[in-house]
Image (spheres, rainbow, N blue to C red):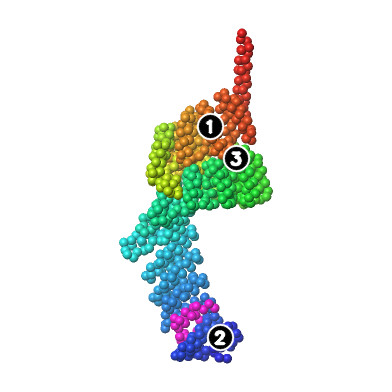
Amino acid sequence: MSKCRQLRHSCFGFPMETPKPNTLHHARTHLSTSSSSSYQMGNILLVAYLTKTLSESGTRNLDPDSIPLSESLVLQILRKNSLDSSKKIDFFRWCSLRHIYKHSMSTYSQMFSTLCRSGYLEEVPDLLNSMKNDGVVVRSETFKLLLDAFILSGNFDAALDILDHMEELGTNPNPHMYDSIIVALAKKTQVGLALSIMFKLLEDSDGNEGNAVGVSLPSSIACNALLVALRNGHMRVEFKTVFAKLRGKRGFELNTWGYNICIHAFGCWGDLTTSLRLFKEMKEKSLASGSMDPDLCTYNSLIHVLCLVGKVKDAVIVYEELKVSGHEPDAFTYRILIQGCCKSYQMEDATKIFSEMQYNGFLPDTVVYNSLLDGMFKARKVMEACQLFEKMAQDGVRASSWTYNILIDGLCKNGRAEAGYNLFCGLKKKGQFVDAVTYSIVVLLLCRKGHLEEALHLVEEVEERGFVVDLITITSLLIAFHKQGRWDCTERLMKHIRDVNLLPNVLKWRADMEASLKNPPRRREDYTPMFPSTGGLQEVMSSISSPKSGSDDGATEDEKRSSADTDQWSSSPYMDRLANQAISTDLSSQLFSLARGQRVQAKGAGSFDIAMVNTFLSIFLAKGKLSLACKLFEIFTDMGVDPVSYTYNSIMSSFVKKGYFNKAWDVFNEMGEKVCPPDIATYNLVIQGLGKMGRADLASSVLDKLMKQGGYLDIVMYNTLIDALGKAGRIDEAKSLFEQMKTSGLNPDVVTYNIMIEVHSKTGRLKDAYKFLKMMLDAGCLPNHVTDTTLDFLAKEIEKLRYQKASIMRQKDDSP
C-alpha cells in the first residue's frame, strides 16, 4: 500500500499498519520539491500525519528536527475540527518551545478562538503572558471574543484583566467592549463594579475632552442598563450621581428608553418635578428634531408616577388623553390605573377602567383581580367582591395565595370573621393557598378577639408547616400579651419559633428599652420641648393652605401660566400643562402620601428599631400611658431612629383623644419638617381634632386642600367628617357628604349609619333617623352594640315626642 493511501486509510479509520518513519520523510520530500502539486500533496500528508499522531499519543512522539514548522502548518492543525482542543493546546505549547519558530498574530488569534469555543478559559492567562513575551499583539476583535467569553462564564475579574492587558499592550479598548461588560455586570447584580467602571470612563473622558482623539463615552445601552440596575437596587444617591454626570457630558443624550427609565425612577422616589421636567424636555426635543417622541412606555411611567404620589385623578385624565394621542393603552396601563384607583378608593373609576380593559380585548390577570378585590373590600362592597371572585373563577383566572389572603382579610374586617375563618380552615385541609401571610392575618384576628391560646396554637402550626413566623406576627402577639398580662407565653413562643435570631432580638430590644426608660440618656437640655411649638392651629392651617402647597390663588396663577405655555395642537395638552407647572412650582413637596403608614415596615433589618418603637407605642398608648410613650419616642429619636408616619400618627392620636390639640398640631408640623408626608390617617386625626375643638367649619377647608393634593376619602375619613359636621349642627352638610360617599363607590358601614342615626336623633329629626335605620337594614349592614345604644336613645326620643303630642292634644281638649 502506498504512503498516501496509508495515510488516507488511517484518517478515515480503516485498518492500517503502524506508520513507518519514512512516512514523514516522504511528506518532507514532497514539500521540498518545486512542483506546486507535489507541495500540496506533501502538506496534506504532513497535516494528516501530525493530526493522527497528536490524536493518538500527543506531542511526545513528535520529532522537532523532522517537522518543518510554519504559520500555515500550525494554523491548519489548530483549525482541525476532528482534533481535540486539549491536543491543540499541547501542540501550540510544543511549537512555542521550538527556537526556530515563533507564533504569529494569526496563530495566537486562532488559539484564543479555540479556547473560547471549547471552554478552556483557564489557559488564557498563560497564553496572554506568552503572547506578551513574544511581542505579539492580536487585533481588538480577538480581545472582544475573549471578553465576551469571560462575561458569559461569569468571570468578571478575568474580563477586566483582558481590558488591563489591552492597555498594557498599547491597544485602546473599543468603547463597545466596556459597554458589554457594564451591561453584563448590571444584569448580574454586580452593580458596584459596573458603577466603578462607569465613573472611570467618565473621568477619562473629562481628561480628554479637549483633545481631538479622546476616550469615547459609554453607549446609551450601557448607561441605561446601569441606571436600571441602580433603580432596582434602590441606590438613589448613585443613580442621581450617574444621571448628573451624564447630563453634564458634551455629546451625550438620553434616548427614549433612558428618559423613560429616569422618569420612572425619579417619580418612584417622590421627585415628581424632575419626572415632569424630563417629559417636557422630551416633548421639546421631539418638536425640534422629530426624534425622542414620548412612547407608550413614557405615558405608562407617568401614569404610574402620578398614582404613586397620590395624584390619581390626574393619572385618569392623562389616561383619557392617551387614548386620543395615537397610542393605545396596553395591559400594564390598565393594571397601574386599576391599582391606583383602588388604593385611593375611587372604585367607580376602577370598575369603569376594568370594563374598558375587557372590552378592548385584554384579559385581566390575577394581579388586576387582586387589586380590585382588595379595593372592594376596603370600600365595604362585600357582595360585589364575592361576585367578582366568582367571575374570576368563571373567566379561568387562577387564584393565588394572595387572592385568598385578600378574601380572608376582607371578610374579617367587614364583620364576616366567621366566614373568613371557615375559609382559612377549608384551605388548610386542602393544603392549598395557605402561606405565612395567611396565618399572620388569622393570628392578628384572634389576638384582637382575645383568643390568645388559639393564636399561639396557630403559631406552632406555622412552624410545623415549614413557614417562618415574621415580625408582624410576633409584634401582634406581644401587644396581645401586654393586653392580657400573659408574659408567661413568651417562653412557649420561644420553643416554636424557627428563626433563632428574630424573637431573641425582640426580647433583647424590649429589655434594653425598659432599661432606657428607667435611666434615660440625657441628650437634650432639660425643659426642651419634644415637639417645638410653631403656632398651633394657625400654623397648621397656613401650612395646609400655603401657596407653595397649592393654595387657590397660587394654583390659579400656575394654571393660567401653564395654559398659556401649552401647545394647543399638542396630543397631550393636560400632561404638558402639568409639566409646565413643574417648572414654576415644586410639585415634589407633596402634602399627602397615598401609601398608608404601617406599624412594621417591609424594609428588612434596617426597619427593625422603628417597628419595635411603633409596637411599644401601641402598647403604652392603649393603656393610656402617654408620658411613657412620649419618653420612648424621645429616647429613640435622640438615638437616630427616624420616625415614620405611623409613629407620628400614634402620638398625634393620643394627643387628640386627650384634648392636647396644640401638641397635636406641633406633631403635624414636625412631620412636614422631617419630610414625612402625612397619609390619610393623619388627616383623619386633623379633622377629628377640629371637630372636638368645635371648628368643624375648618374641616371643609382641610378637605378641599387634601383633595387638591391628590388625597382621597376612605371610610374612616367620611365617618370622621360626617361626625364632626353632625355634632356641629351642620346636618345638611353631613347628609350631602353621606350621599357623596355612596356615589363615589363606597358603601357606608355600621359606623356611618350609627353616626347618621345619632346626629338626626339628637337634633329631633326622628323620621330621618328612622329612615337611616331602615336604609341600614336594607343594605344588609349588621347592627352592633353602639347601634343598640343609639336605638335606645331614639326610642326614648320617639316616646318623649309622643308624650308631648298627647299632652298638647289633651290641653286642646280641655280648653273651652
Tell me the mark number nearer the camera, choosing from 2 and 3: 3
Residue at 51% across / 52% down in the picture? 328
Tell me the mark number nearer the camera, choosing from 1 and 3: 1
Mark seen at residue 381: 3
Q: CA distance from mark 2 to mark 3?
A: 86 Å
Q: Quadrant of the C terminus?
A: top right
Name which residue type carries label 1.
Answer: Ser
Q: Main secondary structure of the magenta part?
A: loop
- Which residue appears farthest toward the left when viewing the image? 210
- CB of mark 1 within 8 Å of CB of mark 3? no
Residue at 45% across / 85% down in the picture? 68
For the residue pair 526 and 325, the one nearer the viewer reads as 325
Q: Which residues are magenta?
A: 59-82
- Residue 311 position, x and y percent, is 48, 43
Residue at 60% across / 25% down in the picture? 767
- CB of mark 2 within 8 Å of CB of mark 3? no
Question: Which sits earlier in the primary sequence, circle 1 or circle 3?
Answer: 3
Question: Which sits earlier in the primary sequence, circle 2 or circle 3?
Answer: 2
Residue at 56% across / 47% down in the picture? 356
Position of 815 relative to 761 (above/below): above
For the residue pair 34 and 131, the one nearer the viewer reads as 34
Position of 15 relative to 107 (above/below): below
Residue at image mark 1: 736
Position of 184 relative to 451 (above/below): below
Element on which disc 1 rests: helix
Q: CA distance from mark 1 to mark 2?
A: 101 Å
Residue 814 within the magenta-colored segment of the rendering: no
Name which residue type carries label 3.
Answer: Lys
Name which residue type carries label 2.
Answer: Arg
Residue 61 within the magenta-colored segment of the rendering: yes
